[in-house]
Image (cartoon, rainbow, N blue to C red):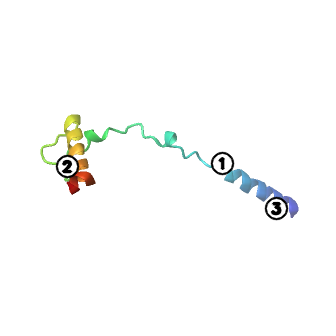
């Protein structure tokens, strides 16, 4: 009885120590693409924007950020 209990506890302890790593380095997707190359068929894409155009993407991100700037809103 005692031997079975010790073996069971040892097995549980070993399963508890075999947790997989959760670091971000392990979670990276190798096929990930930059955001400015987004989907060209997305209904939420702004009209006239073409996927892969980095300068247009940066310009759009800057203009969207200005709408969130409280200093610009108050003045």
Labels 2 and 1 touching (C-beta < 8 A): no
Query: Quick check: 34 left or right of 4?
Result: left
Q: Splitting the image into 4 quarters, where does residue 62 fall?
A: top left
Of helix, strand and loop, which one carries label 1? loop
Task: Identify the residue shown where x is 33% and y is 38%.
Answer: 33
The Cα–Cα distance between marks 3 and 1, rounded to whole angstroms, is 20 Å
Of helix, strand and loop, which one carries label 3? helix
Residue nearer the viewer, 74 or 36: 74
Labels 3 and 1 touching (C-beta < 8 A): no
Residue 15: x percent and y percent?
Answer: 68, 52
Name the residue beneath numbered marker 1.
18
Residue nearer the viewer, 7 or 57: 57
Residue extending furthest toward the front:
75
Of helix, strand and loop, which one carries label 2? loop
* Mark closer to the chain start, 2 or 3: 3
Task: Identify the residue shown where x is 20% and y is 47%.
Answer: 41
Query: Quick check: 9 left or right of 75?
Result: right
Q: Splitting the image into 4 quarters, where does residue 10 fall?
A: bottom right
Q: Quick one: label 1, few (<14), some, or many (20+) residues within 10 Å? A: few
Residue extending furthest toward the right:
2
* Mark closer to the chain start, 3 or 1: 3
The Cα–Cα distance between marks 2 and 3, rounded to whole angstroms, is 61 Å
Query: Quick check: 72 left or right of 13?
Result: left
Q: Nearer the viewer, mark 3 or mark 1?
A: 1
Residue 55: x percent and y percent?
Answer: 21, 35
Name the residue beneath numbered marker 2.
45
Numbered label attached to residue 5:
3
Residue 34: x percent and y percent?
Answer: 32, 38
Task: Identify the residue shown where x is 13% and y is 47%.
Answer: 47
């Amino acid at each position: 009885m005692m031997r079975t209990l010790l073996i069971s506890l040892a097995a549980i302890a070993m399963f508890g120590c075999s947790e997989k790593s959760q670091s971000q380095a392990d979670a990276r997707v190798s096929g990930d693409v930059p955001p400015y190359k987004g989907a060209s068929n997305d209904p939420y894409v702004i009209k006239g924007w073409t996927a892969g155009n980095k300068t247009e993407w940066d310009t759009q991100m800057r203009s969207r950020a200005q709408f969130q700037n409280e200093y610009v809103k108050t003045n």
